[in-house]
Structures are given as C-alpha cells and as structure tokens.
Image: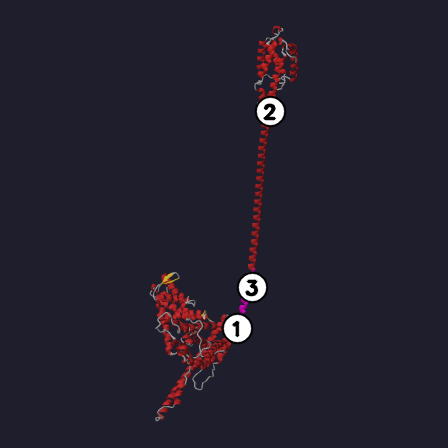
Amino acid sequence: MEPWGDAAGIAMEPRQLRWKTLEALRASSKGRLKYCRHWLQDEDILEGCISPLVLSPYSGWVLDRVIGQSAQEITPSRSSTPKGSTPLTNRSSSLEQITPASQQGSSPPSSTDPNETKGNDELDLLEMDQEDLPAVLPSKVTEVEGCIQMYEEMHRLKGKEGLRQRQEQQEQMVRAVYALASEQLKRFDELKELKQHQEFQDLQEVMEKSLKEAQGQQEKLKEEHRHRAKILNLKLREAEQQRQRQEELERLRKEEGQERLRRLYSIQEEVLQLNQQIDPNYRHKDLPRIDLSAYSNRGNQICGLVSGLIRTTSERGFPTQVDVANTERALQEMRGLISSMQQEIAAAVKEKMRDEEEERQKQKELLKKEQLKAQTPAPAQQSAGKQQKEGFQVKGEESTMQWYQQLQDVAEQCLASFSEISNCKDNNEVKKIKTDLQKAATIPVSQISRIAGSQLREVFDKINNLLSGKSVQSGGRTVSVTQHPQGLDFAYYKLAEKFVSQGEEEVASHHDAAFPIAVVASGIWELHPRVGDLFLAHLHKKCPYSVPFYPALKEGTSMEEYQRMLGYQVKDSKVEEQDHFLKRMSGLIRLYAAIIQLQWPYGNKDGTHPHGLNYGWRWLAQVLNMEPLADVTATVLLDFLEVCGNALMKQYKAQFWKIMMLIQEDYIPRIEAVTSSGQMGSLMRFKKFMEDCLEQKKIPLPKGTLQPSFWKS
C-alpha cells in the first residue's frame, strides 16, 4: 500500500473514512477468523473474543506520534488541499470514530461462507483502492495497521497464555481425575482382594469345619469301634471267666466231694473203732451186774447206718454236706454212747470200790478188835489206805455244779428282768432305746485293740461311764441306761455276751487279742461284779469245758440238743465241723485264762482280783480229776497252760510242777487211750508243749502279754 501523502485524503469525509476503516478491519486477520455458534456454550473458550477490545497502553502514544507527524505534513500544504479531501478536524473526528469502532469490533455473521467473505473482501478492497486509496494518508494507514497488528499480537499472546493456562487446568484436571481414578481403582482392587480373602477364609473355615466334622465323625466311629471291641472283649473275658469259674467250681466240687468222702471214711473208721470198744459179752470179774448188750446193739445200728450212707453216696457220686452231717451226728451219738458206757462202767467201778472200801473198813475194825494190845496200826496199812486211788469222775464236783447252776439262774433272771425291752415290737421309742443301748455296750468292746494303752483306757471309760449311769456318745447320739428302768440290766447282759463272743471270734482267730480284751473285762468285772457273773454264765453255756463240765446224754434228749450242750453250733440240723468247734473252744479258754491272771492297772491296787488265779488252779485240778475226752481235753489244757501256765508257776511253784508231772506221766496216757488216729493233732501239740516245759523247767510268757511300756503309749 502506498503512503498517504495527499492532502485530499485528510479531507475525506468521515462517512467514507468509517467505511474504509471497517473494510480494513474486515480484511484484517482478525476479521477473517471463523466463529461457531457453539462457542457461546463454553465461555472460557470465547472469553477472549467476547470481551470488549481494549487498546494497548501504547496506542495513545502511537496516535499522538501519528497525529503530530500528520499535522506537520499538512500545515505546509494547507493551501493546496485537493478536492474531496478531508480537513484536519474531520480527520481527527474520523480517527476518534475509528478508535471506538476498533474497540467494539464486529465479527462477520456466522452464516457467511468464508469463500464468499473472502471474495467480497477482495472486491471491496479493490473498490476501496480504486476509490479511496489515494485519499488516505499512507502513514496513517500504516499506523492503524500497526496498531491493529500490535493489538492482534497482544490478543494472540493473551489467547496463547489463556490457552496455556487452560491446558494446565485441563492437565491438572486430568491428573486429578487420573489420581481419583487410580485411587478408586486401588480401592476397587482392595475391595476385590478383601472379598477374595473373605471368600477364601470362608471357604477355609467351611473346609476346616468339614474336616473337623469328618474327624469328629471318624473319632466317633473309632470310639464306637473301641466301645464295641471293649464290650466284645468284656464278653469274651466274662465268658472265659465264667468257664474258668465253672471249671474251678467243678474242681472244688470234686475236691470237696473227695474231702467229704475221706471224711466219711474217717468217720466210719472211728465209728468202727468205737464200736469195737463195746463188748456185749463183757463181764468184769468184780462187776457181774453190768450188761452192755444195749450199747452193743445201738453201736451196731450206728455202724450199719454209717455204712449204708457211705454206700448210697458212693453210688450217686460224691457225698453231700447233709451226708457228712448225718454221719457226724452218728459219730457224736457213738461218742455219746461210749461216754455213757464208760460213765456206767466208771460208776459201777466206783460203787464196787466203795463197797470194797467199806469191806476193808469192816476188816480194819475186826483187826483192831483182834489186836487190842497194839497201840497203833501198822504203817503199811495206813499208807495203803491213803495211796488207794479212786476212779476218775465223769461229772464235775457237786460244789462246782451248784456254782454252775447258780450262774445260769442269774443269767435267766437278768434276761427276764428286761423282758419289756427285749419284747418291744410296737413301741418305737423303746426299740430306739434298745438299739442305742446295745450299740453303746457292744461297739466299745469291738474297738478293743493293742494299738495303745490310752486307746484301751478310753474304751474302758466309755463302758464304765455307761454302766455308772452317765451319758455317753454313741453313733452321734447321747445314750444313758437311765432312759429306761430296765436299761442297766440290758446293758449288763449284752456287754457280758459281747465279751464272750469276742473270745470265740476275735481271740479264736488272733490269740494276741485275748490280753487287751481280758484286762478290760477284768476291770469292768471288778467295778461291776454282776457283769462278771453274767460273763461266766455265757462262757459256761458256750463252753462247758470252762466249768469244767462234760454233759452226758440223757434219755429223751435229742442228738441236736445234746450237741449244743457239748458246745457245738447246730444250724438247720447241720453241726459245725470239728476244727471250727475246737477253734472256738480254744478262743474261749484262752480268754478265760487271760482274765484270771490280769487286773486293771488303774483300779484299786489294794483290791483283790474278782476271779483270780485260785479259780484257775481249781479248774486245772478238776479237769485232771475227770475222764478225758478225745480232741477236747488236750486242746483246752494246751490253751490254758500256754496262757496261764507262767502265772500259775510263779504262784504255786513246786505244787504246780507236781501237777505237771502228773499230767505227763498219768493223764496224757489216758488221753491217748481215748484218742483215735484221726484226732492225734491236738494231743501231739500238747505232748510237745509238756516235754519242752519239763525239760526247761520253765513255762515261757505267753505271746501278746501286755508289757508295762504298753500303758505309756
């Protein structure tokens, strides 16, 4: 474009200058921009285009320069202004109009086609160039164009800066969205992983639960299997044990049967031996009146009965206990028969000897009459009368039997005195008192032992307090004999009975137990004499050999009753075995022998023993004056001397040894004469004891003697 140097351009009309300015603006790069109606929806994008145009701070300076230069150029040529040019005032006004027009700016319609716009612009420029170009000042156009370019550059830079900021905002937004998406993705992954862990844990728990259930079921099955196996083993074991028991029972049955059979044979042998002692044709040259045919007939009947029983049992197998009991009853009857025969013979012999003695006395009197001159009889005749020995007794002495009967009467009277207590069936209160009194009287006796002297003293005090009327504790209850008028007699009777039962039970099994029981019984006897009388009554009834007394079979007395009189226990027509019988008798004799030599150490030291050694000496003398019995006599003598022999030796000294010699030389042979081969055990033990004592000239202290140190324990 050529510079505007013509003055006519300055004088251009303001209207034309305005249109040309607009045409120039439309032809500029800004005017050629394309716009879209959708840009209005995004204010940030069109912010630079919609905002009003603002001139640069340098625009005023530019205009001032341009206007100054134009005024200098126009002044010299004012007079030569061309036709159609615009004066300066008009130019100024036109420039002033251009400025607001440039500030407002207008965009072409969006509906105009760019090609058409371009073509129109070219045409307008051509027209403008042809018509108005010469009239425009070149410098002014250049300035305006420069301003426009500067404005466009500034706007472009500002748009570029906005675009950069927008890009940064978009990048920040993208980064924020990316970070948010990343965090959400992480949370999603974590949630997914958590769900996977939970599902895995749930699955693992289900598997563990299933495994536990399976293991539990397996353990249950194993336990059931073990239980069944245990039950089967128990059944097998029980079956095996049952079989073994059956075999053992069968073996025991056979052994017992064989033992019973041997017992039957021994009884038969003894019966036959006893029967041989009966001679129906026996005629003593001095006893023509004795007839033994009745004894012989009965002995033959007993032998036939025993032989028949053995024959019957042999046919059916082994004998039963009933068969043994029947044969033992037959044996006892045979023994009783022999005893009765011996007693009759002894009585006849005694009567004969008494007759002979009377005859001798008569002869002596005749001799005295014939020898009136003699002052003294011949010594030989006196010694012959003294040395003549009478026959052995078959019963106890008369005084002893009276004493025995008195004690039995005392026991019967005592039993009758508490009939109300013993016969109480409907009175519960009396029954309760009876039970309490019986326990209070018998339980302390059962507690007697060799543990300590203090314990023995406590037992003694309990019994003594009860019998003295004091209240005692028994089974957690307070008991006294004053609770019933008959209570004291009842306690006396039961206490004495318990002492005797301890002898046949406890002492029979443990010989050492005789001494603590005896010392307590002796102390109670000393303080309460009635207990001693009842004790002797019970003792004599259960053991007649402690009197001593050998009951004889009387007419009308049954065999069972006679066996009870001899001390045997008979239950349901069954007699106890001989060994058990001897064991009980041994316990009772040992208790009696311990009582007569012991005295309660805490009693009256000046008091005498209520039943001392003199009774033991009398018992020993009376036993030796009686006919011996097989088994029994040797047993009771051995037990009595073992327990009481040492005390008798110290008390009677030489007299005691005389009796010992008598036993050894005279009485033991008599025992051997009535003892069969199957009853030699007790006799051999007695002989051995006598031989040892006579050889050592001493009887040892009995085992179980209470030493002085015992009472300090």
Per the image, the residue denoted by label 3 is 243
Marked residue nearer the N-terminal end (3 or 2): 2
81 w.r.t. 515: above or below: above
68 w.r.t. 488: above or below: above
| Crowding at mark 2 (Cα within 10 Å: few <14, some 14-19, many 20+) | some
Give me the C-alpha separation between circle 1 and circle 3: 26 Å
CB under 8 Å between discs 3 and 2: no
Give me the C-alpha separation between circle 1 and circle 2: 140 Å
Q: Is residue 460 left or right of residue 115?
A: left
Q: Please provide the residue range marked out in magenta.
A: 236-262
Q: Nearer the viewer, residue 458 or 7?
A: 7
Question: Where in the figure is residue 459, as x and y percent of width and height?
Answer: 39, 66
Q: Is residue 411 visible?
A: no
Q: Amino acid at mark 3?
A: Arg
Per the image, the residue denoted by label 2 is 163
| Crowding at mark 3 (Cα within 10 Å: few <14, some 14-19, many 20+) | few
Question: Where in the figure is residue 230, as x and y percent of width and height?
Answer: 56, 57
